[in-house]
Amino acid sequence: MKKLYFIIAILFIVHYSSFGQSLLGNGTFSISGNISFTSYHDNGADNNRTVFIFNPSFDYFVVDNLSLGVTININNISFGEYNNFSWGIGPSLRYYFRAAENIRPFAGFGYSYATEDATISAEDIKYNNIILNGGIDYFLTDNVALETIFNYTFTNIKLPDEYRTFYSDSDISRRSISMGLGINIFLR
């Protein structure tokens, strides 16, 4: 009976340690995508805005638990009777913490530059975003995780001159919070 307990303990240790080493180790690639929703109101504007965001991301683990990557932001923005589309791209950094065998909390930082087709101008609206995020990856298998993510975004917006009718300044600062849900696939 002691041998059986010993074998079970060894198998558990081997499984647990191999899961921890291979999962988010140096040389691992991650492909993820999440969908989030945010709603905000700009000071000085008459309309609330609703934004649905799709964020595919491609990451590489440079050391265990630390990934560098590229994130793409694809946004559908609705306000009043208008519906605009914007997209952006930028670098990201993410660090994973060990919590349990299949639960890995993370904290991240990113930047993106985005453009939006302006409704009343030939010029694009330009966004500079600094993104702080955190969340949890819940591993369904060794390589696939369900991801929840919370983003806090600092945005500086440069509006075309035609927008001065609606805004007192063509440079706007905004802070927004969004929550997303997605899938993360890890490839070694």
Image (cartoon, rainbow, N blue to C red):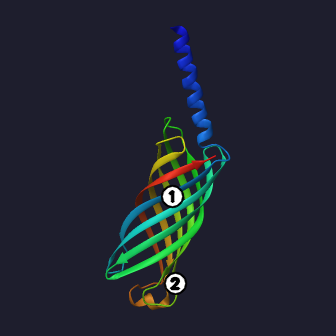
> Neighbour class for label 2 at 10 Å: few (<14), some, many (≥20)?
some
- Residue 124, numbered label: 2
- Residue 15, numbered label: none
x then y, percent, for residue 58: 59, 58
x then y, percent, for residue 68: 63, 55
> Neighbour class for label 1 at 10 Å: few (<14), some, many (≥20)?
some
Q: Residue furthest top?
A: 1
Could you tell me the amino acid type at mark 2?
Answer: Asp
Q: Quadrant of residue 72?
A: bottom right
Please, is residue 122 above or below residue 152 in the view? below
x then y, percent, for residue 156: 51, 73
Could you tell me the amino acid type at mark 1?
Answer: Leu
Please, is residue 76 above or below residue 69 in the view? below
Image-based side of 81 in relation to 33, left or right: left
Judged from the image, the secondary structure of the residue bearing numbered disc 2 is strand
Q: Are marks 1 and 2 in contact (CB under 8 Å)?
A: no
Could you give the CA–CA distance between mark 1 and mark 2, rounded to whole angstroms?
25 Å
Please, is residue 95 above or below residue 113 in the view? above
Q: Nearer the viewer, residue 75 or 150?
A: 75
Identified at 40% across, 74% down, the residue is 77
Image-based side of 147 in relation to 46, left or right: right
Q: Which dot, 1 or 2, sits closer to the camera? A: 2
Lower sequence index among marks 1 and 2: 2
Identified at 46% across, 58% down, the residue is 34
Identified at 39% across, 70% down, the residue is 51
x then y, percent, for residue 127: 52, 75
Q: Nearer the viewer, residue 129 or 148?
A: 148
Q: Nearer the viewer, residue 149 or 22?
A: 22
Write down the residue under mark 1.
132
